[in-house]
Amino acid sequence: MKNTTATFAAMKARGEKISMLTAYDYTMARLVDAAGINAILVGDSLGNTMLGYESTIPVTVEDMIHHGAAVVRGAKNALVVVDMPFMSYQASIEEAVRNAGRIMKQTLCAAVKLEGGSELAPTIAAIVAAGIPVMGHVGMMPQHVNQYGGFKVQGKSTQAAQKIIDDALAVEKAGAFAVVFECVPADVAREATERLCIPTIGIGAGSGCDGQVLVNQDMLGMFDDFKPRFVRRFAQAGKLMQEAFKAFDREVKGGGFPNDSESFAREPQEVKRLY
């Protein structure tokens, strides 16, 4: 059954957990969708996972549209949310609405996501007023990495924790249908979840959120150089893929691929010497 923003609201009301994974292309979107995952996030994390950047900062609106449209074509039932990249919504409310509309129009996604709390409330309200569903994002916000001085847990002090909760409440009041909590103490995310009427999606925010999201490359074990504390490896797909690539290399170089059953032949009467 097709997941919508209304599905999210109903699941929170029933106390059902929401599953969300990232995807950045048609093939991965089809696999995630077929697994029954409720939502797919086309995150600006594609800057790291797909484009090789060190952060999400260089990602453009064009990048998000290119990957977002491919994911939408592969997802039949999952709700697809596309990130608004750095500086696509911060300069002015008018530009934010215009870019959100462009992303939705050209990808056919169900919603956009942007980072920020109270200070972004007017922008969220304007985008929602334009008929575009918005997912909020508070706590550790990757687009603020240079401001933080690195990827660091947010909300450790009482004052900082209160700021995160206040930001989430402001995002809800502005009209967002859901909000992501990233890298915040579990008790902060749990309290916010209890106070909010909209669903919360956690990533490094404990089990008290209404749902969870992970980057698919992380949970599939496709990167060995770094594993965030909040990531669980649900498979070792990276090793499996490397083994397959090595087997292909051996078979090609050893003359074992392709064999006769993997090749095409002409009818015997047609086989004549070619000059």
Image: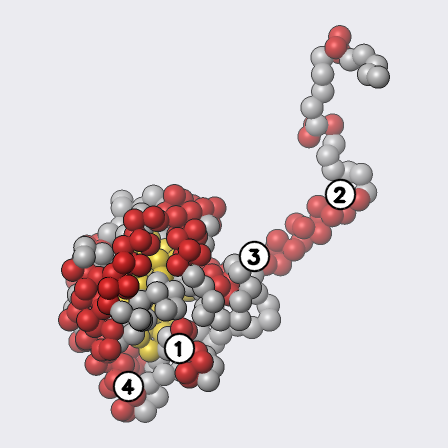
Q: Quadrant of the N terminus?
A: top left
Near-viewer residue (114 or 14): 114
Marks 1 and 3, how far apart at CA: 31 Å
Q: Nearer the viewer, residue 225 or 190?
A: 225
Amino acid type, residue under disc 4 in the picture: Ala
Q: Position of residue 249 (x, y in %)?
A: 74, 48
Task: Name the outermost residue toward the top.
Answer: 269
Q: Residues within 10 Å of mark 1 (few under 14, many from 20)?
A: some
Depth order, front residue of 144/192 = 144
* Dot 1 or dot 2, earlier in sequence: 1
Place of residue 153 in the rendered image (x, y in percent of width and height, measured from the top left)? 40, 82
What residue type is disc 1 on?
Answer: His
Q: Which residue is mark 3?
A: 237
How far apart marks 1 and 4 lie (CA) works out to 17 Å
Secondary structure of the residue carrying numbered label 1? helix
Point out residue 268 in the picture as x, y percentages from the top left corner.
75, 11
Q: Secondary structure at mark 4?
A: helix
Mark 3 or mark 4: which comes first in sequence?
4
How many labels were placed on the picture? Answer: 4
Res 160 visible: yes
Instruction: Tell me, for residue 144, which label it has, or none.
Output: 1
Quadrant where the C terminus sits is: top right
> Where does the image place residue 105, in percent across and percent down from the top left?
30, 49
Amino acid type indicated by mark 3: Ala
Disc 3 is placed on an element classified as helix
Residue labelled with disc 4: 161
Instruction: Report the side of 189 relative to 54 (left or right).
Output: left
Q: Residue at x 16, y 60 (%)?
A: 129
**Within-10-Å neighbours for mark 2: few <14, some 14–19, many 20+:** few
Is residue 136 placed above or below 192 in the rendered structure? above
Which of the 4 image quarters holds residue 124? bottom left
Residue highlighted by disc 2? 251
